[in-house]
Image: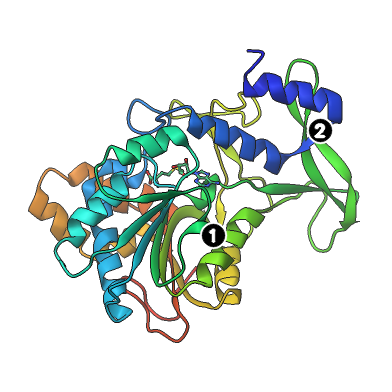
Amino acid sequence: MSGSLAARLARRIGRDGPIPLAEFMALNNAAYYAGGDPFGRGGDFITAPEISQMFGEIVGLWCVDAWERLGRPADIRLVELGPGRGVLMADALRAARLQPAFRPEVHLVETSPALRALQRAQGFDAAWHDRVETVPEGPAIWIANEFFDALPVRQFLRVNGCWHERLVDYDGSHFRFAAGPALRHAGAGEDGDISEVCPAATGMAAALAARPGYGLAVDYGYVEPPRRPTVQAVSGHEPVDPLSRPGEADMSAHVDFAALVRAGREGGAAVWGPVPQGAWLKRLGIEARAARLGGQEEALARLTGGDAMGRLFRVLAFGPAGAPAPAGFVDGEGG
Ligand SMILES: C[S@@+](CC[C@H](N)C(=O)[O-])C[C@H]1O[C@@H](n2cnc3c(N)ncnc32)[C@H](O)[C@@H]1O
């Protein structure tokens, strides 16, 4: 216990005072993902590529199509952000073999040593990075499924007409929220509102937008800010109090798609979507693929159903300014 993240945080907060929620979330997730394999039915949550190979196959064919749109450069990087167990990339590369001329250099952005080991065990050649900035320059196609939601968010609480950053304090037995000093007078809204921002996500989106190529982000999130906190924590498929078990539960927040769209455009990219995951997968032929594979009824319903991931999750694409909409998107469609 004395070496655990909880004990280290308790000592640090006792000595130096409360820390911003974003820092708590970053430390929580670094420790959580370093701890091993949280995926699958026996783990804490299940992601789309873990539900069915169809998801990664469709993403892989989307990448081949994006490469064709770039003029088939021989020198092309395929970059995945937060690859989990590496299942999405393995399925994508297998499907992409349908076009043998597409031979990308694979780069995985992953901070967890335990997950890097699982990704390596998938057997494809790749280079690993802690940050996207170290991926070599040049044309790239990047993919990110449930990555942006894992990045740390800052929260601001409105009290007496002013915004205060939400901090995490320790009362001797529990971690709890505390309000930082007043930052600035609030504009629209009401006392009690909580606003969230994710500078890590918008910074990453701007950096990705500045690279030549295409990108695909799939995540759950919103276009209209909800005025309430969306940070949540999951352990064993059950929601838990986000502050209750530092390093032992997956902390995530709904993705602000409007902020990613703005960051992408400011970074110089064209941006399409977000469109619901279910509609996007259907446009790219998931029903035909399911019929061909057989036995995919439950997976198809989970990935595309309006009451499942099909509407909760959304897909956003980046591409070269001035290019027409990539596969599965329609110009002018979003939200
Ligand atoms: C929810 S998992 C998604 C896994 C995978 N994309 C999937 O669909 O199964 C989040 C992934 O992002 C990684 N990750 C989280 N924060 C990161 C960061 N700041 N930099 C790089 N990787 C990070 C985690 O280690 C994990 O691989």
Q: Residue 323: horizontal and vertical position, in percent?
A: 40, 84
Q: Residue at x 18, y 70 (%)?
A: 101
Who is closer to the viewer here, 57 or 277? 57
Q: Is residue 86 above or below residue 263?
A: above
Q: Quadrant of the N terminus?
A: top right
Q: Which mark is residue 18?
A: 2
Q: Residue 20: horizontal and vertical position, in percent?
A: 76, 41
Q: How many marks?
A: 2
Residue on which disc 1 sits: 133
Q: Quadrant of residue 325?
A: bottom left
The kind of secondary structure element at disc 2 is loop
Q: Is residue 156 above or below residue 207?
A: above
The kind of secondary structure element at disc 1 is helix
Disc 2 versus disc 1: nearer the observer = 1
Q: Quadrant of residue 97?
A: bottom left
Q: Is residue 81 above or below residue 272?
A: above
- Relative to 38, is 162 on the left or the right? right
- Relative to 203, is 314 on the left or the right? left
* Label 2: how many Cα within 10 Å (few below 14, some 14–19, many 20+): many
* Label 1: how many Cα within 10 Å (few below 14, some 14–19, many 20+): few
Q: Residue at x 30, y 41 (%)?
A: 50
Three-letter amino acid code at disc 2?
Answer: Pro
Q: Residue furthest bottom?
A: 322
Q: Residue at x 19, y 54 (%)?
A: 94
